[in-house]
């Protein structure tokens, strides 16, 4: 084992530990941004409890917080909706935020476990042990901490084009083919474009190239999101609808994983394969 290889292993371990530290910091910040989802559940419950005592046109109400006796909660209301509809909206957001927070926590636990292993490996490394150095180098390559050379190419290949469709309104809709492409599609889309993904299932990222799509375009794009997902065989699939600006990707997160802030709308649609074939870009 050459001295240069030993140095490469040492530097790669340092880089990996530093990278994991940054990933953990990013995940903790993301968890803080999501905030305390339980408060949303409390607000929904309070609105249902005091439904007959609240004026929805006022824009807000102040109610006793049953989790903190002696304190009140200010709950903002959408005057265009009934109190029960406002309550359901809070419950809806609670479930979404909780799912997002649960995902962050899972990644945080994994990252912290990885960091422990990485630090232990670094502490146990003996630069003079050739066999150990070979083994660790292989591990680091498998973990992408050491990059191997790409033959016959001076740069990494560009992501393949996503699936492309044109809605009845002639609006372009792009659908990712894999996790890496999902990332590329979502992270390079214009911030005011619309984005879709099936709720609670694996599936493609979908970007609508419009800042103000019609209801028909939204429904057709949602059907595409449902069709290109694990929900393809179901009769009804819930699809989340957001603006691209609501999305962010935690540092170190696996390809295809994004989190969102704020509220998302949900459309429940049929994953229509025939419609997908009809709307597909003609080559």
Image (spheres, rainbow, N blue to C red):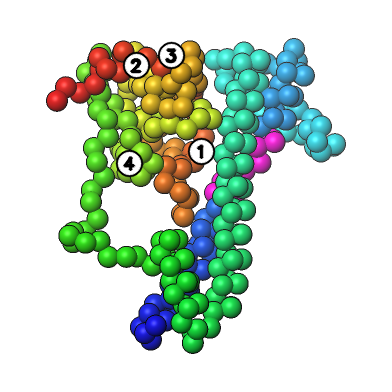
Q: Which residue is mark 3?
A: 270
What segment is highlighted magenta in the picture? 30-39
Question: Quarter of the image holding residue 207?
Answer: top left
Q: Nearer the viewer, residue 32 or 5?
A: 5
Q: Secondary structure at mark 3?
A: loop
Q: Nearer the viewer, residue 132 or 226?
A: 132
Q: Which residue is mark 1?
A: 261
Left or right of 75 on screen, residue 159:
left
Q: Is residue 160 above or below residue 152?
A: above
Q: Which residue is mark 2?
A: 273
- Rendering coords of residue 203 (x, y %): 43, 31
- The CA span between labels 4 and 3 is 24 Å
Q: Are marks 4 and 2 in contact (CB under 8 Å)?
A: no
- The CA span between labels 1 and 2 is 31 Å
Q: Which residue is mark 4?
A: 181
Left or right of 156 on screen, residue 242:
right
- The CA span between labels 1 and 4 is 22 Å
- The CA span between labels 2 and 3 is 9 Å
Residue sitting farthest toward the right: 69
Q: Mark 4 against mark 2, which lies toward the viewer?
A: 2
Q: Mark 1 against mark 2, which lies toward the viewer?
A: 2
> Residue, x 66% and y 15% (percent of image)?
84
- The CA span between labels 4 and 2 is 21 Å
Dot 1, crowdedness within 10 Å: few (<14), some or many (≥20)? some
> Magenta stretch containing residue 36, yes or no?
yes
Dot 3, crowdedness within 10 Å: few (<14), some or many (≥20)? many
Q: Secondary structure at mark 4?
A: helix
Q: Is residue 170 above or below residue 73?
A: above
């Amino acid at each position: 084992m050459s001295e240069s290889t030993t140095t490469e292993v040492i530097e790669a371990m340092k880089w990996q530990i530093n990278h994991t530290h940054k990933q953990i910091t990013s995940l903790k910040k993301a968890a803080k941004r999501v905030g305390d989802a339980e408060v949303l559940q409390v607000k929904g419950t309070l609105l249902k409890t005091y439904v007959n005592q609240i004026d929805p046109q006022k824009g807000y109400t102040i109610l006793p917080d049953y989790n903190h006796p002696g304190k009140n909660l200010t709950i903002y209301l959408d005057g265009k909706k009934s109190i029960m509809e406002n309550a359901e909206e809070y419950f809806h957001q609670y479930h979404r935020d909780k799912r997002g927070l649960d995902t962050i926590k899972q990644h945080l636990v994994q990252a912290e476990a990885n960091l422990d292993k990485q630090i232990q490996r670094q502490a146990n490394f003996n630069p003079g042990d050739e066999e150990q150095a070979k083994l660790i180098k292989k591990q680091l390559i498998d973990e992408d901490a050491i990059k191997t050379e790409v033959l016959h190419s001076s740069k990494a290949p560009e992501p393949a084009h996503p699936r492309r469709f044109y809605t009845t309104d002639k609006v372009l809709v792009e659908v990712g083919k894999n996790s890496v492409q999902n990332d590329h599609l979502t992270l390079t889309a214009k911030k005011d474009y619309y984005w879709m993904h099936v709720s609670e299932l694996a599936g493609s990222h979908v970007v609508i190239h419009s800042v103000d799509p019609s209801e028909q375009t939204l429904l057709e794009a949602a059907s595409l999101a449902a069709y290109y997902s694990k929900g393809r065989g179901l009769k009804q699939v819930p699809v989340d609808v957001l603006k691209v600006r609501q999305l962010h990707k935690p540092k170190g997160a696996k390809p295809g994983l994004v989190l969102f802030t704020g509220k998302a709308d949900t459309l429940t649609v049929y994953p229509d394969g025939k419609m997908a074939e009809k709307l597909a870009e003609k080559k």
